[in-house]
Image: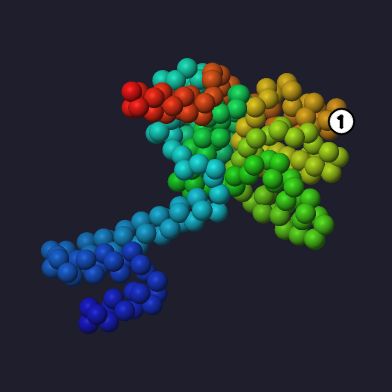
């Protein structure tokens, strides 16, 4: 009878329940449970399994640049990272409030890692997240306009609880990209959250966006009441490379 029950669980795709029940049978612990306790254990196992699968799928779909976590952030380096601020952002309350986060600083300072860590935390809490390199996203959207899939791509962006635009401002926006950016920002304003990382300080974004009227409209929606992380210091990539080189020299000696 137990074998038949396990087969039914597998057919119904109750993976967590199947695993938990099978382990209980193999360890001969089923007799220790009352009927209510066994049912509760099996349901909890199935719920945990589905939550884990959902979390893994969200992370996979987000396509983060780094496999990052807030717990691994180094606050001891002099980068002007406020631990309390980051931990507050880690609660994802800013997503509930449809607020934005702006992360600026020189290249290699860790902006992408911080945004990835916040994105992973959002996935862990059940939010839908999409992570994009900004120039690549707008190149993709240009191609989508050409092949007729633009509306589909825009709707996909709209549905994300959190949209991360990394490397914003590396390339100036042309007229088409500027209009697309305005459309994305307008769709999300007051409805969804945005994280933007950039090597440029916010005051320089006007020049990158171009056309003052549109730039004003876009930045008014992005910057107003946004949470800001302004990272400072030397490139971590250069620092790590230097440490590796120094270690290599010491080993040679």
Asked if 116 appears above or below 3 in the picture, the reply is above
Question: From this viewpoint, is residue 118 visible?
Answer: no
Residue that protrudes farthest toward the front in the picture:
253
At x 33%, y 23%, the residue is 253
Image vertical order of residue 34 relative to residue 56, above or below: below
Left or right of 115 on screen, residue 208: right
Tell me where residue 204 sits by quadrant: top right
Q: Tell me the element at label 1.
A: loop
Q: Residues within 10 Å of mark 1 (few under 14, many from 20)?
A: some
Q: Is residue 76 visible?
A: yes
Residue 116, relative to residue 246: is it above or below? below
Residue 106 percent location from the top left of the image? 61, 24
Residue 172 image point, x, y percent: 78, 33
Q: Quadrant of the N terminus?
A: bottom left
Q: Is residue 66 above or below residue 19?
A: above
- x, y percentage for residue 56? 45, 54
Quadrant in the picture for residue 148: bottom right
Residue 154 x, y percent position in the rendering: 72, 52
175 with respect to 17 (left or right): right
Front residue of this view, candidates 129 and 60: 60
**Residue name at image x 63 percent, y 44 percent:** 132
Residue receiving disc 1: 211
The image shows a total of numbered marks equal to 1
- Judged left or right of residue 202, residue 209 is right
**Residue drawn at point x = 78 percent, y = 29 percent:** 208
* Of residues 107 and 149, the one drawn nearer to the viewer in this rendering: 107
* Residue found at x 13% / y 68%: 28
Q: Which quadrant of the view contains residue 33?
A: bottom left
């Amino acid at each position: 009878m137990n074998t038949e029950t396990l087969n039914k669980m597998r057919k119904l795709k109750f993976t967590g329940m199947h695993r938990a029940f099978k382990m209980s049978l193999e360890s001969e612990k089923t007799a220790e449970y009352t009927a209510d306790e066994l049912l509760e254990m099996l349901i909890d196992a199935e719920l945990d399994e589905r939550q884990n699968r959902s979390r893994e799928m969200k992370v996979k779909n987000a396509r983060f640049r780094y496999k990052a976590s807030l717990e691994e952030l180094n606050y001891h380096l002099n980068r002007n990272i406020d631990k309390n601020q980051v931990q507050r952002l880690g609660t994802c309350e800013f997503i509930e409030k449809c607020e934005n986060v702006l992360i600026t600083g020189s290249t290699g300072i860790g902006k992408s890692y911080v945004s990835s860590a916040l994105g992973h935390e959002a996935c862990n809490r059940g939010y839908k997240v999409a992570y994009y390199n900004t120039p690549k996203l707008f190149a993709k959207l240009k191609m989508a306009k050409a092949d007729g899939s633009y509306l589909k791509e825009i709707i996909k962006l709209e549905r994300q609880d959190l949209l991360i635009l990394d490397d914003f401002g590396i390339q100036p926006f042309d007229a088409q990209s500027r209009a697309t950016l305005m459309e994305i920002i307008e769709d999300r304003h007051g409805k969804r959250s945005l994280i933007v990382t950039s090597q440029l300080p916010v005051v320089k974004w006007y020049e990158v966006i171009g056309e003052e009227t549109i730039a004003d409209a876009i930045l008014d929606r992005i910057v107003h009441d946004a949470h800001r992380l302004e990272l400072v210091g030397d490139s971590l990539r250069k620092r790590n490379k230097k440490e590796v080189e120094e270690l290599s020299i010491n080993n040679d000696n």
